[in-house]
Image: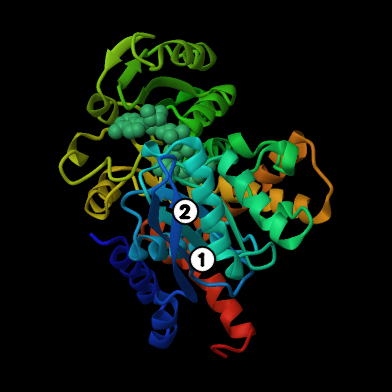
Amino acid sequence: MNPYEMACIQLERAAEMINLREDIVEYLKVPDRVIEVKIPVKMDDGRIEVFTGYRAQHCGIRGPYKGGIRYHPNVNRDEVVALAMWMTWKCAVVNIPFGGGKGGVRVDPKKLSESELERLTRRYTAAILPIIGPERDIPAPDLYTDERVMAWIMDTYSVYRGYAVPGIVTGKPVELGGSLGRKSATGRGVAIITREVAKLLGEELKNLTVAIQGFGNVGYYAAKTLSEMGAKIVAVSDSKGGVLNWEGLDIEALFEHKKRSGSVLNFAENITNEELLSLDVDILIPAAIENVITKDNVRDVKARIIVEAANGPVTPEAEEYLDKKCELVVPDILANAGGVVVSYFEWVQDLERYFWDEERVNSELERIMVRAFEDVVKTKNEFGEILMRDAAMILALRRVVKALELRGIFP
Ligand code: NAD
């Protein structure tokens, strides 16, 4: 399904549950602003190649727009608008003062040299410069963009202003005003939410088994933090396959093994990604890519709890089935919001020019994630038998609608 249509369906579904006025729903379906820009780049062989880029700003009613920039051949207008809309809900669920934004360039970054990538980034930044800024719209990394790309964006923007503006992007190198704890934030947030789910269900993490699909940034830090909290991580996978040990995997040793060999394979009993998804574990954490639990394989899933660390790993049809079978499916807009929360801390530190130690970052992250979880559970209890995703959407919508009301747009 077109991601924008999917985002609108999710919005309509939650709006109907709270009898939201039709005119507000229509208002929220449309982004505040989208720009499409032409990016001419001088390639290493002397040719000029022209790329297309976008920046979408969905709803700035609660604060500046916030969201990543992706470099991918599939980037298009509908995709960035949908992703920006999801960012609006994610920021509202955790109650940080941002609206949703997203940007991207239609390009296969693997085909570009480092210097071509730098020229592309600088030209794209110049093209969207009129609508970004630390008070207006603050980009961050997303698919195939990293802290090096953020440093180029910060430099381009700062050169234009005439002074260093670290608050223009988050996910920067620490030496340029990045935040300690940013790298681990999403995985740590996933672990905090998983711990809170266990508590809600009256269980102790140390008695629960966990399988994690994906051992990249999010999967690794979720595994590390959860095992520090006492959970038994029995299976982990990457794009090449997975490993299983019912006695529990040593996550640090596995990380070293992956660093050495390029994959988690052969660290313990090898399994496929499909086998990992159907293991008889208590908690399954998809932390790799979207659409991995679908109507075709959902009947094989045996986990009692699913925590969406990746964006969109469970399709809507699969979720309906899981709703009847599982105890809880924790939606991405809550479970993986730790990244944007620490991005918020990075922005605050940049504006104040006062930097926190990692302990403070982690304890403030803990506070915000636990509060968001409690708010979502309270909303779910208010409605009875609804999906946790719907509860999170309703919570976010109410916060956005309240701001629209107070600002007098929909009095
Ligand atoms: P990453 O590139 O660091 O790691 C992705 C991992 O998934 C790798 O281990 C890769 O081998 C594995 N993988 C890829 N395809 C797979 C497949 N078909 N089956 C199994 N494993 C596969 O990415 P990341 O930053 O860890 O992001 C993971 C997910 O979390 C993405 O959906 C991303 O959008 C989402 N997310 C990330 C952040 C963040 O701060 N990094 C924040 C919010 C959401």
Quadrant where the C terminus lies?
A: bottom right
Q: CA distance from mark 1 to mark 2?
A: 10 Å
Q: Which of the four quarters of the rendered structure image does ligand 1 lie in?
A: top left
- Of 374 and 248, which appears nearest the observer? 248
- Residue at 33% from the left image edge and 45% from the top image edge: 290
- Residue at 50% from the left image edge and 24% from the top image edge: 231
The location of residue 90, given as percent across then percent down, is 51, 58
Disc 1 residue crowd, few under 14, some 14–19, many 20+, Cα 10 Å: many
Q: Height in image: 310 above or below 87? A: above
Q: From the viewer's perspective, is 205 left or right of 403?
A: left
Q: Height in image: 240 above or below 56? A: above
**Residue type, numbered disc 2:** Ile
Residue identifier under label 1: 396
**Residue type, numbered disc 1:** Ala
Sequence-wise, which precedes: disc 1 or disc 2? 2
- Residue at 67% from the left image edge and 38% from the top image edge: 173
Residue identifier under label 2: 333
- Of 68 and 117, which appears nearest the observer? 117
The location of residue 225, given as percent across then percent down, is 57, 28
The label number, if any, that marks residue 98 in the structure image: none
Label pair 1/2, CB-CB below 8 angstroms = yes
